[in-house]
Image (cartoon, rainbow, N blue to C red):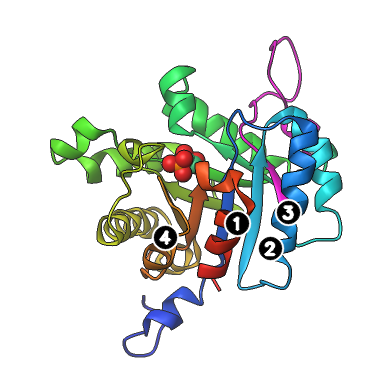
Amino acid sequence: MLFFKGTPTKKEMKDTRRTVIAGNWKMNKTPSEAKALVAAIAEKAAGKDACDVVLCVPYVDIPAAVEAAKGTNVKIGAENVHFKESGAYTGEISAQMLVECGVSHVIVGHSERRQYFGETNETVNLRAKAGLAAGLKVIICVGEVLEERQSGITAEIVSMQTKLALAGIEDLSNVIIAYEPVWAIGTGLTATPEQADEVCGIIRGVVAGLYDEKTAEALTIQYGGSMNDKNAAELLAKVNVDGGLIGGASLKADAFGAIIDAAQ
Ligand code: 13P
């Protein structure tokens, strides 16, 4: 924190970066349902400009979601992106396709992709680079599984994932990192605010080492894993937690609206 005069206050530290409240809908909602839910969330988000609000939706929902988000302060993201520009990659979607559909953000390296679809640190890095090259803001997910936390190697795992995901990326201005402990995803087991703050701080330290203090202080680092309308305020109050990546609670306009409110 070299660029602050004296010891910075919590508010001063938080003011160096943008809070981002992002929903990850995963494999939920048809296009017509997406249209209605985006509209309902946009209503909740109106005038709440202390954070960015992003909804990452299934590919086929993107056109309906983009249309419903027009003229609102909700931005639409995708849940993954392939690293090649085009070619024989059945079932994959390129960054340029997303850009042309009006997408501004993309998630890469979600633990469900790593767990069920063979995503590796290397492909996460390639996907992140492809998204950035196309001008997208990229939300890179990292996080330990339960056995790793219980073995006391959370810091090592998350540091390694962060370093490998960022390899060869020079400019972090369009990068967001989401710390998502795998044991907290969809389980109702939220990390405590202290645990979330600690690991987000470790990630910030890794970034400071790879880049510099100023880059680390400017980086948005979200927490994800059973964040909801009840626990959001406490998590978001932590100095290293700059937003949330929210699964289940992003599928309900009231709950997601309350999380947006907690970020104001
Ligand atoms: P839940 O909020 O449902 O635990 O999901 C978190 C997540 O995986 C967001 O990417």
User: Is residue 195 one of those drawn in magenta?
Assistant: no
Tell me the amino acid under the disc marked 2: Lys
Above or below for 74 versus 59: below
Tell me the amino acid under the disc marked 3: Ala
Q: Name the residue under label 2.
A: 44
Query: Do labels 2 and 4 touch, CB within 8 Å?
Result: no
From the viewer's perspective, tell me whether residue 249 is left or right of residue 147. right
Above or below for 86 versus 233: above
Say the numbered circle drawn on residue 40.
3
Per the model, the C-alpha gap separating discs 2 and 4 is 17 Å
Mark 4 vs mark 1: which is more N-terminal? 4
Residue 136, given in percent of the width and then of the height, sits at 69, 46
User: Is residue 83 one of those drawn in magenta?
Assistant: yes
Per the model, the C-alpha gap separating discs 4 and 1 is 12 Å
Query: Do labels 1 and 3 touch, CB within 8 Å?
Result: no
Q: Nearer the viewer, residue 19 or 176?
A: 19
Q: Give the range drawn in magenta.
A: 75-99
